[in-house]
Image: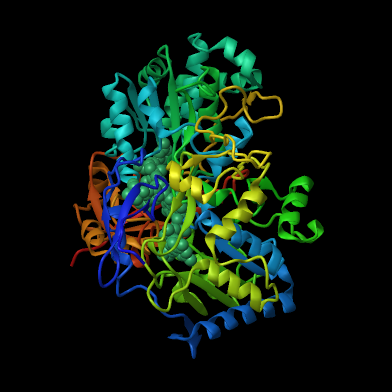
Amino acid sequence: MTASVTPTHCPYCALQCGMNLTPVPGGGVAVAERADFPVNRGALCGKGRTAPALLSSRVRLTSPLVRTGGVLVPAGWDEALARIAEGLARTRADHGPDACAVFGGGGLTNEKAYALGKFARVVLGTSQIDYNGRFCMSSAAAAGIRAFGLDRGLPFPLEDVPRTGCVILVGSNLAETMPPALRFVTELKENGGTLIVVDPRRTRTAEQADLHLAPRPGTDLALALGMLHLIVAEGRTDEEYVRDRTSGWEEARAAAMAHWPEYVERITGVSVPLLRQAVRMFCEPGNAMVLTARGPEQQSKGTDTVGAWINLCLATGRAGRPLSGYGCLTGQGNGQGGREHGQKADQLPGYRKLTDPAARRHVAEVWGIDPDTLPGPGRSAYELLDAMGTDIRSLLLMGSNPVVSAPRAAHVEERLRSLDFLAVADVVLSETAELADVVLPVTQWAEESGTTTNLEGRVLLRRRAVDPPEGVRGDLDVLHGLAALLGVEKGFPTDPGEVFEELRRASAGGPADYSGITYDRLARENGVFWPCPADDDGADGPQHPGTPRLFLDRFATEDGRARFVPVSHRPVAEEPDDEYPVLLTTGRVVAQYQSGAQTRRVDELNAAAPGPFVEMHPRLAERLGAADGDAVTVVSRRGRAVAPARITTAIRPDTVFMPFHWPGEGRTNTLTNPALDPVSRMPEFKACAVRLEAVRKD
Ligand SMILES: Nc1nc2c(c(=O)[nH]1)N[C@H]1C(S)=C(S)[C@@H](COP(=O)(O)OP(=O)(O)OC[C@H]3O[C@@H](n4cnc5c(=O)[nH]c(N)nc54)[C@H](O)[C@@H]3O)O[C@H]1N2
Ligand SMILES: Nc1nc2c(c(=O)[nH]1)N[C@H]1C(S)=C(S)[C@@H](COP(=O)(O)OP(=O)(O)OC[C@H]3O[C@@H](n4cnc5c(=O)[nH]c(N)nc54)[C@H](O)[C@@H]3O)O[C@H]1N2
Ligand code: SF4
Ligand SMILES: [Mo]
């Protein structure tokens, strides 16, 4: 390996910031600025900057572990893989293929996600595969497909954001969750544009806003409907656009007109004058965007809620036009690509539908199998975890830590413990890996190549910069080895470039068409936006340029029109009552990532965010008799958690907020409600009813 500089991308969030890596003698790499990548122009947050710490960390796994006499002990790779193959084969023989399940993650590269989906369907023959992206942006994906016929997080590059007129950021705290992207909204303001932030908390992001609306958690749907009502009442709709480019307006309009501003004020707590001000700002002549993140999406009505915000864009002619539109800020490193290539329960590569006969024929041909042997759609992530130990008997898990991150986590943990067999591939001994029968230590981002697709739909190449330590193997090697032990010798190459070549063919002609993208091109071009079909002639002529901006001429629906969906307000699945009078909402802090499996093992990040807390308003704290820093017990119908109070006027008095990055006593997901959205099957992470008790001081 040469000691030269390798340009690559961050292992964490969906921004996929560009960075340069240089190997450090003795192990690991040094991170340096990489100014040529337009998304971050060299800027990195603390997580990206410290990502190399985990490469040479002592806590990283460097040997497979197998459970022997009740404890995990180091073992060789041959033994570990054989144990997994045996576990899966026994389940299949005793209970049928659907008793084997696979769980993936949106942090896995496109190549891994593709191989994992293929492994489930071709090697195990199971329909039971899903992944953590179901917990992430699935409601926005469902709403995007319903309205536009296609789901790509942002239909435009981030560089368009500062050039629009008004941005409504709904439930995104990007100052903490994508810090380098804050630049795009501060530049918007410098350019004379306006920023509206919708968040029950006055976050660091909300502090940047010209207008901050702080609705009660779980009421964004009503808020958007109230705004649409005012838009109609004030004659601010774009009639020509609605006529020429959309369908279904009459029904959607009628539904919105039932949501009077005063009624919306009662539901959301946002006053009618503020609602009017938001409408005025959004309807200024010119362009506007609505960007959503997990706030409105992680609700048991997330799909309809995003639909309501999309309706607002459509009614005002703000979608499929330059510098205007609706977008979802996808979360995980490969949150976009991870939902396109087949680790989702209902999906085949290229964002094809598993129920579509033509899609099945196409992919089966690439895989060299009979389409009739392809299983049908399986269960969604929470439903799959809930079925562990009942009709699911064995699980292979890669790239997720549900013991910390799944809703109703104590129940999920108990389900995982009741499995006949659990195998986990990870870089560290996560809380989920601790429960496994076999743990496989895998390589990390800087030690392997592969592609990710960032939140803009920009396909990127991560490059190997250093050799992995002895004892670890890549996820692709794991799948290759297991496939061979289970009797499938071909079709699971270990070289990511070879997997990508197959992915290109499998995606060709699908909605997420990657067939015109090659590793060579990615190395030259700093990313290519899908869809990017291959040239038919195969000659060296002009290549498809990729598609940075979607929908400018037509939407991806059959008739090319965007579809309004009539939606109406409904309450959260669990409204506060006398017994559980307060709403809990959950989310993130800047220094920790997700279940914390990686970032809790980095000293600098731990020092910045050492543990969980319960953010609450002074009035609520006073009623409770809690001072700042006092331990507070939070009780829901699922269980209880304890964490110190953090008292601030930045949150509504009827709501508390907890970050979800920690296991144990302060595990937020012990409390959360797995009520699912009927379309996307997204759990309601953002609202459940709780009771608070101040812990007695001695
Ligand atoms: N530091 C850090 N960065 C990350 C991650 C991380 O774990 N840590 N994870 C990455 C991933 S996978 C994701 S998905 C993204 C998530 O990125 P964000 O969506 O920005 O993160 P969250 O903190 O989950 O939620 C955003 C905001 O929603 C607000 N909110 C809560 N309930 C409601 C509601 O009912 N309505 C509205 N409108 N807002 C509400 C919360 O107060 C919070 O400020 O971040 C990515 N980046
Ligand atoms: N209460 C509450 N809960 C939430 C949310 C919320 O807002 N509130 N947000 C939800 C969201 S948006 C998300 S995305 C989920 C995320 O939650 P998780 O799915 O738990 O995500 P991570 O913590 O990133 O887990 C990834 C695991 O895979 C490992 N890993 C990393 N890279 C690789 C790799 O390449 N291969 C393998 N084999 N392993 C790897 C990591 O070490 C880690 O253990 O949490 C959800 N849970
Ligand atoms: S913002 Fe996201 S991609 Fe950029 S450095 Fe931070 S974690 Fe990495
Ligand atoms: Mo996410």
Judging depth in this view, the residue of 144 and 270 nearest the camera is 144
Residue at image x 29%, y 70%? 27
Expressed as whole percent of the image width and height from the top left, the position of residue 291 reads 44, 32
Residue 582 in view of the camera = no
Is 248 left or right of 360, judged from the image as shown? left
Q: Is residue 257 above or below residue 545?
A: above
Expressed as whole percent of the image width and height from the top left, the position of residue 533 reads 62, 39
Image quadrant of residue 146? Answer: top right
Expressed as whole percent of the image width and height from the top left, the position of residue 344 reads 61, 53
Expressed as whole percent of the image width and height from the top left, the position of residue 570 reads 55, 35
Judging depth in this view, the residue of 185 and 544 nearest the camera is 544
Judging depth in this view, the residue of 382 and 620 nearest the camera is 382
Is 94 left or right of 513, judged from the image as shown? right
Residue at image x 49%, y 91%? 69
Residue 387 in view of the camera = yes
Is 119 left or right of 280, judged from the image as shown? right
Is 507 left or right of 336, judged from the image as shown? right
Residue at image x 53%, y 28%? 310
Instruction: Report the colour scheme.
Output: rainbow
Figure quarter occupied by ligand 1: top left
Label total for image: 0
